[in-house]
Image: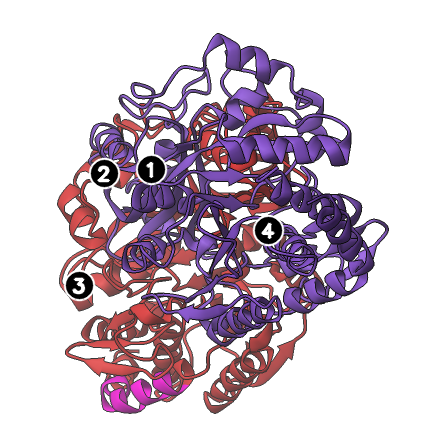
Chain colours: A purple, B red
Amino acid sequence: MADERAAALEHARGNRDRYLNELIEFLRIPSVSKDPAAADDIRRAADWMADRLRALQVERVEILPTAGHPAVFGVGPDAGPSAPTMLVYGHYDVQSAAPLDDWESDPYEPVVRGEYLHARGASDNKGQIMACVGAIEAVLRSGAPPVNLKFVIEGEEEVGSLHFGDLLRENRDLLACDFVLNADTGMLGPDRPTIFYGLRGMYSCHLTVSGPSHDLHSGSYGGVVHNPIHALSALVAGMHDCERRVTLPGFYESVTPITPEERAEMAALPRGMESYLEQSGAPELWGERDYIPAEREAARPALDIIKIEGGSSKAAIPTEARASVSVRLVPNQTPDEVHEQLLRYLESHAPPTVTWEVTEWGGCPPALTDRNAPAVHALSRAMETVWGKPPIYYRSGGTIAAVGQLQTVLGVDSLLTGFSLPGDHVHGPNERIHLPTWEKGIEALVHFLYNMVE
Amino acid sequence: MADERAAALEHARGNRDRYLNELIEFLRIPSVSKDPAAADDIRRAADWMADRLRALQVERVEILPTAGHPAVFGVGPDAGPSAPTMLVYGHYDVQSAAPLDDWESDPYEPVVRGEYLHARGASDNKGQIMACVGAIEAVLRSGAPPVNLKFVIEGEEEVGSLHFGDLLRENRDLLACDFVLNADTGMLGPDRPTIFYGLRGMYSCHLTVSGPSHDLHSGSYGGVVHNPIHALSALVAGMHDCERRVTLPGFYESVTPITPEERAEMAALPRGMESYLEQSGAPELWGERDYIPAEREAARPALDIIKIEGGSSKAAIPTEARASVSVRLVPNQTPDEVHEQLLRYLESHAPPTVTWEVTEWGGCPPALTDRNAPAVHALSRAMETVWGKPPIYYRSGGTIAAVGQLQTVLGVDSLLTGFSLPGDHVHGPNERIHLPTWEKGIEALVHFLYNMVE
């Protein structure tokens, strides 16, 4: 298939500007899955994606409803029964762009500055999914497809893939495949192609600490009634010890230790303290003292309060204070066990001067995938062809609920890759994608598809 | 003046419904001094108050501008050079009514339910100031006034009387007086008339703790970068020790100990643990273990975080977290010394993984007034006449910046009283005033005015 491969690469290069313009069109849709007011935009993004798959001449394209936002499904053309079936996973929803004031340009009016395209979703995940689409178009236009193709592009990744498990269960046959291509991660640097073989899981909940039955004048009650803000602050502060370890009882018991081999591998990564400092802008790094930052990100659990709020500008002791708890899990932690640990922590640490409640809890397990799968080797060779060096193998500190759900329901591993770079401000203001890397990513995916059968 | 006294009491009783309707009219104006959008309502409230003073036939009424909201000034009629001059202090501004959902009725549509009138400002301070106005009208309609009368009704009490000191300095001669009547406090119970001889002062500021330069994906940086919410929570938690004492260095050094006599007096107050529990709705009380609640409220300092905020519902480590610090001061603490103590605390406790900043700091000193002043005796006798029992002497845990400013600039003490009750939800939702107590208050003030010269 050397001719097809060359033709496909040529097609990808020749259609670079159109690919970029299509991405820009897609990025203009503010498909914020968390925003109830964005329902029309969510639908518009799903339709846009379905149309794009139809333009690929994918044989059958459907919008599959869920109890939440729909998923876009596509299948074909057929590569024959002996060819493996690849399911392309992605998501057309994005995180909120707030706070808008911190953006240098409108998050939904994509703009190229230098080598970067800036917009919400430029990396996560619209840019990445359009890299897959671009590569697949190039292959389909250049001859018979080397693999059987299926697509499932969901609309709820940024809200924890709430209904994706149900979708898989209800469409098990439709989505049956040999492996999943998931380009929702990234690379460690522009010359550091990366394959991820693991993801952290997630446990999240809302914690409310309540005190008086109504706002109290802080003159009359200051020093007399426990301020729920103080009680919540103490509970939050107590969730880490002075060694920066999480204090929930039993928290580390089911954590799989990092093997000496993996530690050596992570120590050799181009992901040292300096790179974290530079990319975060933090005055210093922080975290468990016995682990290097790369280990803390990928292979150690972490507890973050992503939101805290309570009180007002009134001189009053408020009735309650609230925190949103977000815990990144590593094998073999489970959301259920962390939930129980949090409850036990609160039971033993919350003072009797306040009451507390944990609500809206949920999560997804961490994942590890087989580094020796054929698809991993095919992608590795593709990356070496494009970047001139083999990929780095690393685990992602992020969470993609769908990966665990695909493992559980369909029994398939996900090939985790992507062309986002560490400074691309994923989830933050000024999200961007590095266009030269994106274009290389498209070429790498072209090679990967042919490598699957060669 | 027995005839005048009887006539004045008769006038007050005969005009009770009109007095109530006037108060309701005043309460309908949402004069929230903190709300920039309420400027028109602030002006409307000042005009309303000025008109009301004019209707009293106060000789000269002016609206005195300040760099912020104006104050309403009135003087006369003349009681002769041998009569003392009383300055009636009050404020026509109110606290915000947020959160509106917690109100059982519109905060600006006053409604009588049972013996209570409900509205924002019903107690603080529109109800109280209208009790003074009602008593003074009754006296002025019944003969020559026993004291020379002046009024200063400001519009910035709820934002710390920001420009009241300047107003006093600029109008020193106009406002010269022998003492101030300040009905901005309350009573310990419907049958517990109270004279306050002290107030707590206030120190306040905003504390911002900053970490990364942009919101960071909590998957990539959770466990690697210090979350400013965690750092702020630890700083807030550390501001009290396990004995519930404030840990700012030197915080208690200039606190005047409570004398054994005062401790005995406070122990005898009808202000025990049960009353605080019932009025606050808190599961338990809290505070310094060596002091009873009444002492902690009135004669011990207290530190409260009245607001905390940081992060969003995004799974991100935010760039910063913020807290509003509010410290109630007792003699002889000063706002300046507490500011220095807070800075020293932060310097020694903030970790190098974050930066911090204290902004918008300010405050006012605590106050103690002479319990043996003639006006105190006159009011005490008046209360005994109306309630059949002598008043309780207590210190208020609240802060009225104007009291210290009047002491400093005009050299006069304030007679601190009021007819608000502990359950009146001052500053909170469902603020109210107990109408039978309010009416007794008007009568007590009538007696007080005649007692000043008899």
Is residue B367 at least partly visible in the picture? no
Mark 4 / mark 2, whichever is N-terminal = 4
Tell me the element at label 1.
helix
Quarter of the rendering containing residue B139? bottom left
Tell me the element at label 3.
loop
State if disc 2 and disc 4 touch (CB < 8 Å).
Answer: no
Q: Residue at x 63, y 55 (%)?
A: A136
Tell me if residue B17 is in the magenta stretch: yes
Residue B202 locus on image (x, y percent): 50, 45
Which residues fall within the magenta stretch?
B10-25
Residue bearing mark 2: A353
Q: Are marks 4 and 2 on the same chain?
A: yes
**CA–CA distance between discs 4 and 2?**
44 Å
- Give the side of residue B132 with respect to residue A82, left or right: left
Kindly identify which numbered label has been placed on residue B371.
Answer: none
> Tag 2: residue type?
Thr
Please determine whether, in this image, residue B262 is positioned above or below residue B71.
Answer: above
- Crowdedness near tag 2: few (<14), some (14–19) or many (≥20) residues, C-alpha within 10 Å: some
Mark 1 / mark 2, whichever is N-terminal = 1
Residue A418 locus on image (x, y percent): 62, 42
> Tag 1: residue type?
Ala
- Give the side of residue A396 with respect to residue B105, left or right: right
Q: Is A269 or B338 nearer to us in this picture?
A: A269
Q: Residue at x 26, y 83 (%)?
A: B111
Label 4 marks a residue whose chain is: A
State if disc 2 and disc 1 touch (CB < 8 Å).
Answer: yes
Q: Residue at x 52, y 89 (%)?
A: B51
Kindly identify which numbered label has been placed on residue B190.
Answer: 3
Please determine whether, in this image, residue A129 is positioned above or below residue B328.
Answer: below
Kindly identify which numbered label has been placed on residue A124.
Answer: 4
